[in-house]
Image (cartoon, grey):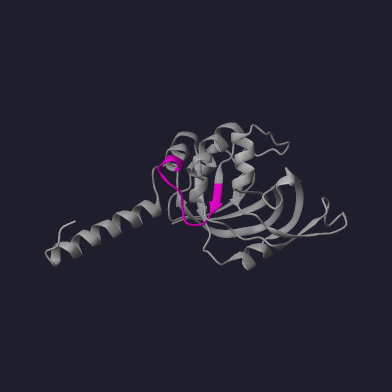
Amino acid sequence: MTHHVLDMPVDEAAVRALRVGDTVTLRRTLFGIRDATLIHMFDRGRETRLELAGHAVIHTAPNVRRVEPSEAAPVGYEPFCIGTTTSMRMERFTRPLMEREGVRLIIGKGGMGPGTLEAFRDLGGAYLAIVGGAAALETTWIEQIEDVDMDDLHPESLWRFRIRDFGPLLVGMDSHGGSLYANVRDDVASRRAAVLASIGAGE
């Protein structure tokens, strides 16, 4: 297994070098996105002024503090607790997010499905996993909220974070058809079948 340090944004070749089981640390920029953001972008046709091409997005609706705008808080927000939400319910947005906005990496918890795996294979992407309950640690990796768009959806706005050594994150899905989540499902199904056979029970 290999550890990769990626200065965002990255190109397709850098993402296709990632393999399931590798670890990744991100630097410079990360975007926060969630259900409402994606629904407005792709179901309701809203466009963002933020440039996502080559970047990573994290599934989050962060807890933030409103403060007076300053050099340290240019858009009047500072991070309080920026955790990660479950990714699977946003499965249908992976391909349009990559095709229209050029996103390369998705960060979340719980993994995603076959549609996402196909999009990663076709377009060059990967899923980076965070263990649930690590919000306090994640927040220490975020230096500043640099910008925000669609803030009428707060807290499910589109956030641009300045990050410092965000990770290590685990490559859970890659562009070569690899998926830790599919492997676990297959292993569970196999073990279940073996247990049922051992006790003479059918499906």
The residue sitting at 64% across, 59% down in the picture is: 165
Q: Which residues are magenta?
A: 106-116
Q: Quadrant of the C terminus?
A: bottom left
The residue sitting at 14% across, 62% down in the picture is: 201
Q: Is residue 28 left or right of residue 78?
A: left
Q: Quadrant of the N terminus?
A: bottom left
The residue sitting at 64% across, 46% down in the picture is: 8
Q: Quick check: is 108 in the magenta stretch?
A: yes
Q: Nearer the viewer, residue 194 or 15?
A: 194
The residue sitting at 15% across, 58% down in the picture is: 202
Q: Is residue 112 left or right of residue 139?
A: left
The quadrant where residue 79 appears: bottom right
Q: Quick check: is 178 in the magenta stretch?
A: no
Tell me residue 24's x, y (percent).
54, 55
Q: Nearer the viewer, residue 99 or 5?
A: 99
Residue furthest to the left in view is 200
Q: Nearer the viewer, residue 144 or 198?
A: 198
Q: Is residue 182 left or right of residue 46?
A: left
Tell me residue 83's x, y (percent).
62, 61
Number of dots carrying numbers: 0
Q: Is residue 65 above or below residue 122?
A: below
Tell me residue 17's x, y (percent).
48, 44
Q: Nearer the viewer, residue 112 or 170?
A: 112
